[in-house]
Image (tube, rainbow, N blue to C red):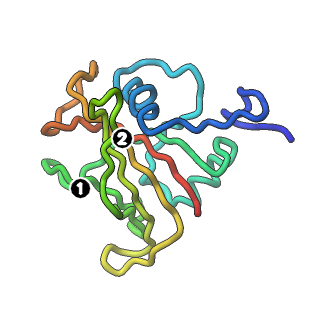
Amino acid sequence: MERRGPIGQFPAGFHFVPTDAELICHYLQAKLDGDDLSYEAFIDVKLYDYHPADLVEKYIDCGEGRWFFFTARDRKYPNGVRPNRTTCDGDGYWKATGTEKSIYHNRKLVGIRRSLVFYTGKAGSGQKTDWIMQEYTTKSRSQKSHHKSDSSMQVLIIFLDLLST
């Protein structure tokens, strides 16, 4: 069986399964700091421009049941802090579910993980789907880039792990 996409650069049997702390400390923080990632397991994409099924279809060769995306955080209101998780066509949205999980590395808080579920339709009357997303954000004040800060948590690029159950 031929391995295509970014996973093809690794030997057979290799599966990319980083821990939450590794995702934040080694990949998301590196991306925020402008460091070059040595391989292409992550895709830069405007995630909210897509329905999850369309996104997976477009990037089918880039994942094995899991896809890793970097995406810019979009705000619901220009001066607000609430994220906008509605698809660009307005016919779906990601809704946070459960509680946020704090991610620690060497006993230090490095980020937050949120679980989100995709709903079709408009907020309030949408239909829940089986699409689940894990959203990772950093908790850092030491980013090299010149992005506008947002209170104590500087979140400009979100690491996403998209799963279909």
Q: CA separation, marks 1 and 2? A: 13 Å
- Left or right: residue 74 compared with residue 6: left
Q: Kindly give the residue lying farthest to the bottom in the view shown.
A: 125
Q: Residue at x 27, y 53 (%)?
A: 83
Instruction: Name the image quarter holding the N terminus.
Output: top right
**Disc 1 packing (10 Å; few <14; some 14–19; many ≥20):** few
Q: Position of residue 19 (x, y in %)?
A: 49, 37
Q: Position of residue 129 (x, y in %)?
A: 50, 71
**Residue 8 bears which disc, if any?**
none
Residue at mark 2: 72
**Residue type beneath disc 1:** Lys
Residue at disc 2, secondary structure: strand
Residue at mark 1: 76
Instruction: Name the image quarter holding the C terminus.
Output: bottom right
Quarter of image, res 62? top right
**Residue type beneath disc 2:** Ala
Q: Position of residue 45 (x, y in %)?
A: 48, 42
Looking at the image, is 153 positioned above or below residue 50? Answer: above
Front residue of 68/12: it is 12
Residue at disc 1, secondary structure: loop
Q: Residue at x 32, y 73 (%)?
A: 123
Q: Residue at x 15, y 51 (%)?
A: 80
Q: Residue at x 53, y 37 (%)?
A: 43
- Left or right: residue 126 compared with residue 60: left
Looking at the image, is 97 positioned above or below residue 63? Answer: below
